[in-house]
Amino acid sequence: MRVFSNCHTHTIFSDGRATAEEMVLAALERGMRSLGFSDHSVQTFDQYYTMSLESERESFLEIQRLRDQYGEKIRIWHGVEQDTHGIVRREEYDYILLAQHYVEKGEMRCPVDSRPRREELFQFRDSVYGGDGAQMAADYFFLAGEAARVFRPDIFAHFDVIRVFNREGELYDARDARVLQAEEEALKKIAASGAMLELNTGGMARGYLSEPYPEWDFLPLWKEMGGRLIFGSDSHVPQFLQYDFDRCAMRLREMGFRSVWELGGLGEALFVEREL
C-alpha cells in the first residue's frame, strides 16, 4: 500500500518552516490525494512554537484560498494540533489532533520534546522527581491518557514523544514496570475515547529515533484493543510530508494489521479506511 495522505503538517503559522502553499505544492508533486494542516494551537505560555491569535486568523484565510485554488486537485483539510493547554474553538476545525507536550507535577511543568530546552527536562527530572525518571515518564503517560479521556480528540498524536530524549535510556528506564503499566493504561483510555492513534514518523525524519511514535512494541497491544491507526509525518518542511510511510506500512502488514485510516480525498469523507 502507498500512503497518499498526511494528517500532521506544520507551516509558518506556528513552528513550521514552509508556507501552507509550499506544502500543498509538494503534496501535489507527490501525487497525494489529501493533506491535513495541523499547526500548534494558541496557548498563553511557551508561545514560541504555537500560533498566535493573529496567525490563527490568517491561517483560516490562507487555507480557504488554497482550497479555492487547488481544491479540484487535492483535498485540503484544516485541523489543529491541540495541546492540553491549547485554546481551540473546536467547531472551526475539521479535526483535532491532541498532543501531550508537557510533564507536570503540581504547579510545575516542563516540555518533553523541545530540543532547545532538552537540559531543562533532565533538570526537572532531577529536581522535581529526585532523579526518578521512570516515575516522571509514568506521570507523563497518565496525563496523556487523561487528556484523551477529557478531550476525546479525533487523533492522538505522537503518543510516546517523551522517548525523543531517551534513545539510550538516559532519561528514564523504559522497561520499568511503572512506565509499562502507565503506557498500557494510557492506550486503553485513548482507545476508549474513540481516537485514532497517529503513527508518527517525525522523530525518524529528524534523525532523533529509529522507530516511529509509538514504538513498534506497543502496536500489538493497540491492535488487540481494536484501535485505529493513521499516518502522520509531523512535517515542518515539504520533503518530510510522507517520510518512511511506505516502509512503515509494510511493517504494519507484517504485524497483522489489515488497514489504516487516512484523511479522505476528493469526494470522500473526512476519514476513510484503506487496506494495507
Image (spheres, rainbow, N blue to C red):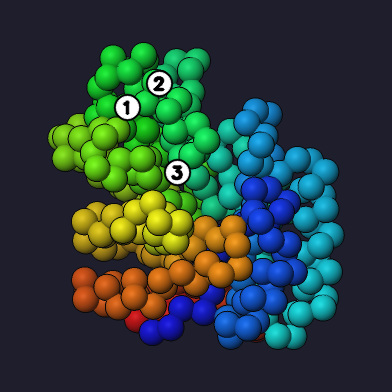
Mark 1 and mark 3 residues within 8 Å of each other at the beta carbon: no
- Write the residue at 77% across / 73% down: 67
Q: Which of 77 and 133 is in front in this view?
A: 133
Residue 56 lies, in percent from the top left, at: 77, 48
Q: In this view, does 26 lie to the left or right of 64?
A: left
The residue carrying mark 2 is: 124
Q: Is residue 173 left or right of residue 91?
A: left
Q: Which SS class for mark 2? A: helix
Q: In this view, does 216 lie to the left or right of 51?
A: left
Task: Answer whether residue 75 is visible to the viewer in this image.
Answer: no
State whether residue 5 is above or below residue 215: below
Q: Which SS class for mark 3? A: helix
Q: Which amino acid does the dot numbered 2 rest on?
A: Phe
Image quadrant holding the C terminus, namely: bottom left
Q: Is residue 177 left or right of residue 170?
A: left
Q: Which SS class for mark 1? A: helix
Q: Which amino acid does the dot numbered 3 rest on?
A: Ala
For disc 2, the neighbor class at 10 Å (few under 14, some 14 to 19, many from 20) is: many
The residue carrying mark 3 is: 148
For disc 3, the neighbor class at 10 Å (few under 14, some 14 to 19, many from 20) is: many
- Write the residue at 65% across / 28% down: 45
First in sequence, mark 3 or 2: give its number. 2
Per the model, the C-alpha gap separating discs 1 and 3 is 19 Å
- Write the residue at 72% across / 64% down: 20
The residue carrying mark 1 is: 136
